[in-house]
Amino acid sequence: MGRFGRAIGLVAAGALAGGALVAGGVALADGLPWSGGDHVSYVKERRSIPAGYLSTNVVCPKGQQAVGGGYAHLGEHDRERPVIAEVNAPSNTSGKPDEVNNAWSFLFMNDKEEPTPIDVYVICAPIGG
């Protein structure tokens, strides 16, 4: 991955997201209109990256697919030993290649001795919408 892929911050993708980035966090109106009365939603969870690596994901509610995702690094930034996101991509929890992506997966590398807090996100839309 190049420098761009290693940037630390919040990443949001997908035209269906319809959210607004505000002051380093995500403000996404839960309940945006969608066909059939369904809604675009997002899930945010906090993780702690220990010294070394953390592989994790955030899963959409049942019946929804991942259309975007990202992370927000919390705590101190160290330019000499940064926390690096090696993976920041859609995935599915079934492990089958043809299944709908219902999660957003991450692999973080923490070169520091102390754990580092991070918020991880997935933006979800109804399947087949």
Image: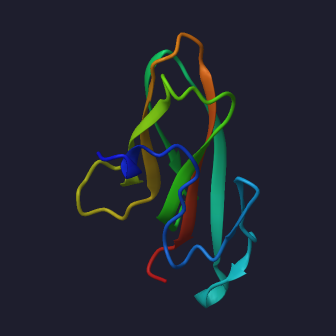
Residue 32: image quadrant is bottom right
- In the rendered image, residue 82, in percent from the top left (x then y), is placed at 50, 28
Question: How many numbered marks appear?
Answer: 0
Residue 124: image quadrant is bottom right
Q: In which quarter of the image is the N terminus?
A: top left
Residue 60 seen in this snapshot: yes
| Side of 99 where 31 appears, left or right | right
Residue 91 seen in this snapshot: no
- In the rendered image, residue 80, in percent from the top left (x then y), is placed at 49, 23
Question: Observer-nearest residue: 5 or 58?
Answer: 5
Question: Observer-nearest residue: 11 or 35?
Answer: 11
- In the rendered image, residue 16, in percent from the top left (x then y), is placed at 54, 78
- In the rendered image, residue 54, in percent from the top left (x then y), is placed at 45, 27
| Side of 50 where 117 appears, left or right | right
| Side of 50 where 96 appears, left or right | left
User: Residue at point 43% right, 41% down?
Assistant: 106
Q: Residue furthest bottom?
A: 35
Q: Which residue lies furthest to the left in this view?
A: 97
Q: In this view, does 59 lie above or below 15?
A: above
**Coloured how?**
rainbow
User: Residue at point 62% right, 85% down?
Assistant: 34
User: Residue at point 63% right, 77% down?
Assistant: 18
Q: In this view, does 89 lie above or below 52?
A: below
User: Residue at point 64% right, 60% down?
Assistant: 42
Q: In this view, does 75 lie above or below 96?
A: above
Q: Residue furthest front?
A: 80
